[in-house]
């Protein structure tokens, strides 16, 4: 009986990851974490750096809150995950500036510290993780980070392409020449289009699920 239990547990963790990454995408479905995308998501390098920072912070903070969240007063939760996020982001900023790219740090030095109070951490680490098992909290943190990264990288790549005719700083044989793409309104347009596509996908997915035959209790018992 251990094998089916392990398989079922793995399926549930996979479902948590997929829901957080796609169906309940933290940006497109819940409108959380939009500000960094609008303000800093103007080229793909920025998008990748902010994605990595989000993952490096959300993963340990979610794990921490799943372990101790139920054992500390509610009023202490925001202090706990905000201070932890600030310490981790300070370390990430130091590594970025001293070992990876000073120019990237110069572009993002205002945004990285502000991510400590990003609503992504408030909503996921301060919400979902508390009361859930560490494995579920980790799956949700991975899915939320992937979902955020997918959105910010797509938006950043399109804005970089439109304003500079480059992707990752590399020139591409496409001349759009739209410097206005760096303005916030272009990010809103792209986010709106992506959110509409997500809603259509979710509708089709639910329609396909409704067409699947139901599995009866007798069939489950027969399989066992």
Image (cartoon, rainbow, N blue to C red):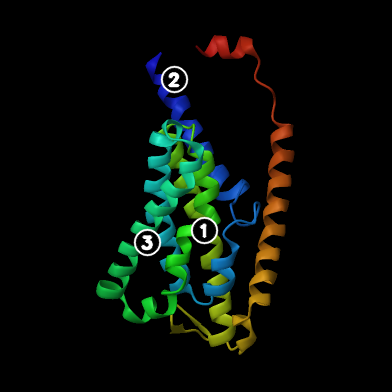
| Residue that label 1 marks | 118
Q: Residue at x 37, y 76 (%)?
A: 105
Indicate whether 135 appears above or below 93.
above
**Figure quadrant of residue 70:** top left
Q: Position of residue 63 (x, y in %)?
A: 39, 41
Q: Nearer the viewer, residue 143 or 109?
A: 109
Depth check, mark 1 against mark 2: the one in front is 1
Q: Residue at x 58, y 85 (%)?
A: 163
Q: Is residue 91 visible?
A: yes
Residue corresponding to mark 2: 4
Q: Tag 1's secondary structure?
A: loop
Distance between mark 1 and mark 3 Cα atoms: 12 Å
Write down the residue under mark 3: 89
Q: 10 Å neighbourhood of mark 1: few (<14), some, or many (≥20)? A: some
Q: Secondary structure at mark 3?
A: helix
Give the camera-side residue of 97 and 74.
74
Distance from the alpha carbon under mark 1 to that under mark 2? 39 Å
CA distance separating discs 2 and 3: 40 Å
Is residue 210 toward the left or the right of residue 102 in the image?
right
Q: Is residue 215 left or right of residue 124?
A: right
* In-front residue for pair 168/192: 192
As drawn, 157 above or below 124: below
């Amino acid at each position: 009986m251990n094998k089916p239990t392990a398989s079922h547990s793995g399926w549930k963790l996979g479902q948590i990851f997929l829901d957080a990454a796609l169906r309940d995408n933290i940006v497109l479905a819940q409108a959380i974490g939009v500000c960094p995308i609008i303000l800093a998501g103007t080229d793909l390098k920025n998008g990748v750096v902010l994605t990595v920072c989000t993952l490096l912070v959300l993963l340990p903070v979610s794990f921490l809150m799943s372990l101790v969240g139920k054992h500390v007063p509610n009023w202490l939760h925001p202090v706990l995950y905000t201070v932890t996020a600030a310490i981790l982001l300070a370390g990430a900023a130091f590594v970025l500036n001293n070992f990876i790219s000073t120019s990237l740090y110069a572009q993002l030095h205002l945004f990285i510290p502000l991510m400590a109070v990003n609503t992504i951490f408030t909503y996921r680490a301060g919400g979902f993780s508390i009361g859930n098992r560490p494995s579920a909290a980790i799956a949700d943190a991975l899915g939320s980070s992937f979902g955020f990264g997918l959105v910010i990288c797509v938006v950043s790549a399109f804005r970089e392409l439109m304003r500079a005719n480059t992707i990752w700083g590399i020139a591409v044989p496409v001349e759009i020449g739209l410097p206005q793409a760096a303005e916030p309104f272009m990010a809103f347009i792209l986010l709106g289009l992506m959110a509409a596509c997500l809603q259509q996908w979710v509708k089709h997915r639910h329609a396909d699920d409704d067409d699947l035959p139901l599995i009866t209790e007798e069939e489950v018992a027969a399989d066992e």
